[in-house]
Image (cartoon, helix red, strand yellow):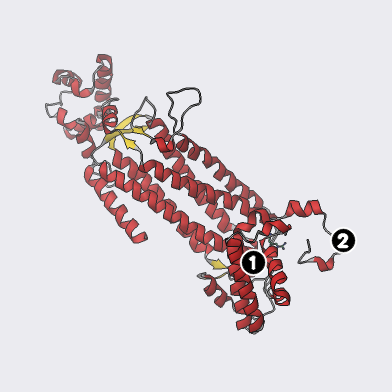
Amino acid sequence: MAKLWGGRFENEISGFADEWAASLPFDKALYKEDICGSIAHARMLAKQGILTEADARLIVSGLEEILDDISSGKLDLTADGYEDIHTAVESVLTERIGAAGKRLHTARSRNDQVATDTRLWLKEGILKDIGLLSDLRRALIKTAREHTDTVMPGYTHLQHAQPVSFAFHLMAYQQMFTRDAGRLWDCYGRTDAMPLGSGALAGTTYESDREYLADELGFAGVCSNAMDAVSDRDFVIEYIGACAIIMTHLSRFCEEIILWSSSEFGFVDVDDAFSTGSSIMPQKKNPDMAELIRGKSGRVYGDLMNILTVMKGLPLAYNKDMQEDKIPLFDAADTVSGSVAVFTAMFETLKINADAMEAAAKKGYMNATDAADYLVRKGVPFREAHEAVGKLVLHAIKEGKPLEDLSLDEFLEHSGKFEKDIYDAIDIRACMDAKLSEGSTSLDSVEAQIAAAEESLGSAD
Ligand code: ARG
């Protein structure tokens, strides 16, 4: 295959090495961005008098045709063994329109071209991810609204800790996914600068209008140092970093759904549409999607290590190593968008067993802290109250009873400050509602959290 850079060479590149080094098999995903970038570039060159209007018209209509042909499947760029997407598009263009095609690569390099294509592609990808996260946040809020009165055990160390509402638990994740969206927005802002016109590394000798190009391509501005523009992939690292955190949050949530759907918990039932069976055990219903999402977090962490390692130690400016950036980038983007979409659909069809949650919440002495707080309200120092209630719990465990089933005499044996109203104070819902601090699991607080989340989602649309 003829090379764009063949002039200086006496001999051909090894066919085997050429094929091995080609990026077209993966960077073909950038065809739309590459062509749109070239169309804007041709228009800019004509506007600046660097290219004739006639040549620019031929180039633009040729590129538009190529775009249509690729999109409709009429043109397969991979069939001819081109080196990369930039070479493929330019070569097909020249084949189709002749000499004018050879003028397109004036005042640019593949180095600023690939950085521009990648940023364009990523900007769209980020917006898609933010949309998917909004759907998930909406689903969480909707279910939270329905479960502000559903009590469940709150855990630390996976041991019963204090009663919380299911809505409260869901709103914790809602907060995490809100920050995830915020991280993506931050990354979007830094990706939104245009490298085109930087040339290979030092700028170009032409009077390019880079502001015009940025406008045409929808960038907020231009990269202000040509060497930086073609050298760095920090926006890719940042994006995959944000993806890795999203996968961490999804993975933790999946782990809980897997636990909750076991017969030991029975808190939720994963819909058949998101479960699979066993080829040998007829009774099985497995939460495969949740497990897979948990597993796919490993892929995205790997993608992050991949790009960090590729970039580490590269001298400025462009190095061919950087061609490897697209593999982890595309993989992380596909994995995250698929995982968020499948998770949301699985979550929306989840059956919630509020009775099982409440029954579990009544076990494990989760009202013990409230019994201690009760004593504190009666003037007992917290440390002493903790000790007294600890002994009370030990007594209750030996009796095989929850605290609320102990007699007042049994309470009084452990502290003379207990009175009849202790029973109201340790009622599971009362314990939940007694929380006064901002951001707590009390009904008022959770409703405020839901209202604030709805408002922030509304304003994000
Ligand atoms: N395929 C290359 C990449 O993705 C395009 C840039 C090539 N530039 C170069 N100087 N060889 O990085």
Residue sticking out furthest to the top: 398
Residue that carries the numbered disc 1 in the rendered image: 113
Q: Position of residue 411 (x, y in %)?
A: 18, 21
The residue at the point 69 percent across, 78 percent down is 205
Q: Position of residue 177 (x, y in %)?
A: 41, 49
Confirm if mark 2 falls within 8 A of ligand 1. Answer: no
Q: Disc 1 to disc 2, how far (Cα)?
A: 27 Å
User: In the drawing, does residue 365 fall left or right of residue 264?
Assistant: left
Residue that carries the numbered disc 2 in the rendered image: 11
Confirm if mark 1 falls within 8 A of ligand 1. Answer: yes
Q: Amino acid at mark 2?
A: Asn
- In the image, residue 161 above or below residue 450: above
User: In the drawing, does residue 136 fall left or right of residue 427?
Assistant: right
Question: In the image, ligand 1 is in what quadrant?
Answer: bottom right
Residue 208 seen in render: no
Mark 1 or 2: the one toward you: 2
- In the image, residue 150 above or below residue 124: above
Residue sticking out furthest to the left: 420
Q: Quadrant of residue 262?
A: top left
Q: Which of the marked residues, 1 or 2, is nearer the chain's N terminus? A: 2
Q: Crowding near pointer 2: few (<14 within 10 Å), some, many (20+)?
A: few
> Are discs 1 and 2 less than 8 Å apart at CB?
no
- In the image, residue 252 above or below residue 116: above
The residue at the point 26 percent across, 20 percent down is 391
